[in-house]
Amino acid sequence: MELITEADFKNKRAGSAIFQFSANWCGPCKVLSPLLENITKESDVECFKIDVSTNPSIAREMGIQSIPAVFMYKDGKLSESFVGSRNKNQIQELIDKVYGN
């Protein structure tokens, strides 16, 4: 999963992609990241990670108070989001709902 900056996020959210807001020190983030990466590879959905420690202004702008926080954009519009960890089936259901895979 590619680590991106605030500027990258603002450009990439204009399309269709999944964004995980996380931090290196976050245990649940470390569990969710590889799961998201594997599921999105199977679904052909781009997935990016944003470190809230190095990009705090976008975290504030998005209203993130807890991590991991995941936002799913389709055609430039926020379609779905969740905070905390999810299992593979729950994530796949959301991806199918949003992207129709």
Image (cartoon, helix red, strand yellow):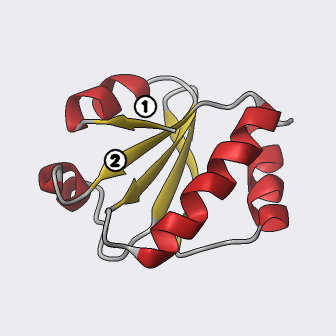
Relative to the observer, which residue lies in front, 80 or 55?
A: 55
Label at residue 13: 1
Q: In percent of the image, x 50 and y 52: which residue is there? A: 71
Contact? badges 1 and 2 (CB < 8 Å): no
The spot of residue 25 in percent (x, y) is 31, 71
Q: Is residue 6 left or right of residue 69?
A: left
Dot 2 falls on a residue whose secondary structure is strand
Q: In percent of the image, x 34 and y 47: which residue is there? A: 50
The spot of residue 88 in percent (x, y) is 79, 63
Relative to the observer, which residue lies in front, 84 or 14?
A: 84
Q: Is residue 86 left or right of residue 6?
A: right
Q: Is residue 79 above or below residue 9?
A: below
Q: Is residue 81 visible?
A: no
Quadrant, the C terminus: top right
- Residue type marked 2: Ile
Between discs 1 and 2, the one toward the N terminus:
1
Q: In percent of the image, x 49 and y 65: which residue is there? A: 30
Label at residue 32: none
The image quarter containing residue 99 is top right
- Residue receiving disc 2: 50
The spot of residue 43 in percent (x, y) is 79, 35
